Amino acid sequence: MATTKQTVVAKLRKQTDKGKLADNVVIAYRLKGGVCEDRVEETVSISAPGGLRIKVKDKLAMKPQGEVSSKINSQDSLALCKLLLDGVDNMVPAAKASFIPDTLIGSVTFAIGDETETFYFEADEEDCEHRGQPIPTQIKDIMSQFNKIEKKHLRHKSQDRGALR
């Protein structure tokens, strides 16, 4: 009897259905690119059970930037994983990804141990609207949620730094 290899996404869906991510799960959300020589570079990595690492660099934005490691509770990491999995159907698998230069690109990498799957999406709402291809609601929700996480944790970092002065 032949067995089929289960994808990382399928395995994560089973874990989220059970309400718990395995300890060897890592999820990385990234935004990179844009006009002005890769002006944006943002990464949010969630590692079960509860690790959170954020790195934000934007050459033109007036928003909190920097790098911080923090904690995230298991329910929040599970909810973020579900949100990302709900949006996968609106993303392009790595093998099929192709974008024009200077495009702001989002990606999500799901990892369980040594197995990984990466998916991509266009992340510039203006560019997509201009071409008549609006960003799907699920992708907008993902970008909004991760933007909130970045702001919250980077703001705490800058407040902590200010308290030490």
Image (cartoon, rainbow, N blue to C red):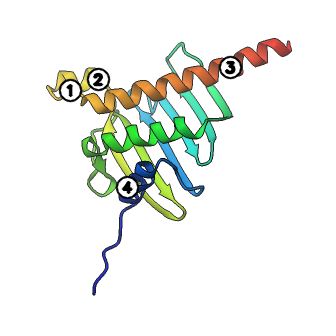
Instruction: Decide: few, some or many residues near mark 4? Use Cα within 10 Å; few <14, some 14-19, many ≥20.
Output: some
Name the outermost residue toward the front: 18
**Mark nearer the N terminus (2 vs 1):** 2
> Which badge, 4 or 3, comes first in the chain's sequence?
4
10 Å crowding of disc 3: few (<14), some (14-19), many (20+) = some
Residue 66 in view: yes
Which structural element holds mark 1?
loop
Left or right placement of residue 31 versus residue 56 in this view:
left
Q: Is residue 58 visible?
A: no
Camera-near label (4 vs 3) is 4
Give the Cα separation between the discs numbered 2 and 4.
26 Å
| Nearest to viewer (mark 2 / mark 4) | 4
Reading the image, the residue beneath label 4 is 9
What's under tag 2, amino acid-wise?
Glu
Closer to the chain start, of discs 2 and 3, is: 2
| Distance from Cα at disc 2 to Cα at disc 3 | 28 Å
- Residue 154, image quadrant: top right
- Name the residue that disc number 2 marks: 125
Give the amino acid at mark 3: His
Labels 3 and 1 touching (C-beta < 8 A): no
Of callouts 3 and 1, the N-terminal one: 1
Residues at marks 3 and 1, CA–CA distance in whole angstroms: 33 Å
Q: Quadrant of the C terminus?
A: top right
